[in-house]
Image: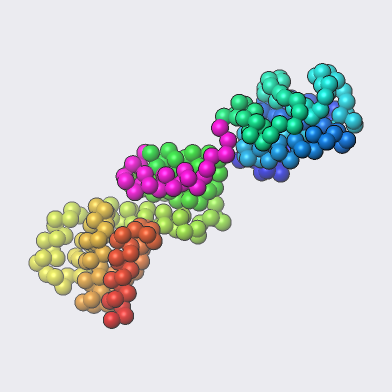
Amino acid sequence: MSDTADLVKDTTTAAFRQDVLAESMKQPVLVDFWAPWCGPCKQLGPLIEKAVKAAKGRVKLVKMNIDEHPQVAGQLGVQSIPAVFAFDRGQPVDGFVGALPESQIKGFIERLVGPLGADIAAILAEAGALLETGDVAGAAERYAQVLAEESENPEALGGIIRAQVLAGNLEQARRILSTVPEAKADHPAIAGARAALDLAEQTAALGDVAGLVAAVDANPLDHQARFDLAMALAGHNRRLDAVEHLVTILRKDRKWNDEAARKQLLQFFDAWGPMDEATLTGRRQLSATLFS
């Protein structure tokens, strides 16, 4: 995505070919013909700049003062200002005259590049809800939609990593995680996704649940078997059962294996998210066990 500072610029007659014709080969470019004495120009200017910045690099705006640079406006037949021309692939393709309201400016740009101003928060909420219901493909599609607008959005990056984990695409999830900018690496959404991926990779190597259940039934004090069973249950999304087995280890031997049960519970909570039912239940049980 382009930085918003690069989306709006002034041009001259000499620079017009590069700033407009050449640049419009990459994305549409709007040319705003204006003058300092023009009242409607002053009304239009801030609104069209706002709309262009909302498009986040899908369109650019070039402003030309016709008092200083009248030649191009004359060649295009501009007779009153403000006048806005849209250039695409080196050719004028649309335009308007006068100070339009913000809604009409947005509509003008949308005719060029498609819908603008997607509600990122709403899309992320919808994606999260789809992920909770197991619609991994639908969630991934929504997260990708956000990333098309905001390529470094940590909520969307974390969400799409989780979607890949739930789909069993652990290598793809790890690849996406490796692309996360360092500045975003400690964001809760990224940290949670990393924990979910780590957990999935750990549980992928465990044996079947039935064998581990038999081992625990045969020796309830076999903490390693119970720990492995908790991991396997988490891998099968039986979260509350996994929590119960780790809490059982804590109740019997809090210090076992350098507090492995407590540490694993904390990883579960990171992987599942703070509002997950198993996280809430597990935190209550962990607190009751540690401070009883």
The answer to whether 276 appears left or right of 142 in the picture is left
Coloring applied to the structure: rainbow
Extreme residue in the right direction: 68
Q: Is residue 28 magenta?
A: no
Q: Residue at x 40, y 48 (%)?
A: 128
Quadrant (top left, top right, bottom left, bottom right) of the N terminus = top right
Q: Residue at x 87, y 23 (%)?
A: 71
Residue 64 position in % (x across, y down): 82, 31
Residue 23 visible to an observer of this rendering: no
Residue 89 position in % (x across, y down): 67, 22
Residue 190, above or below 70: below
Bounds of the magenta span?
115-137
Q: Residue at x 75, y 32 (%)?
A: 99
Extreme residue in the left direction: 218
Q: Residue at x 16, y 60 (%)?
A: 212
Residue 39 visible to an observer of this rendering: yes
Q: Quadrant of residue 111?
A: top right
Q: Is residue 126 magenta?
A: yes
Quadrant (top left, top right, bottom left, bottom right) of the C terminus = bottom left
Residue 235 position in % (x across, y down): 27, 54
Residue 148 position in % (x across, y down): 53, 39
Q: What count of labels does the image hold? A: 0
Extreme residue in the bottom direction: 292
Which one is in front, 87 or 14? 87
Which one is in front, 42 or 2? 42
The answer to whether 259 appears left or right of 86 in the picture is left
Residue 79, above or below 128: above
Main secondary structure found in the magenta portion:
helix
Which one is in front, 199 or 31? 31
The answer to whether 193 appears left or right of 76 in the picture is left
Residue 257, above or below 41: below
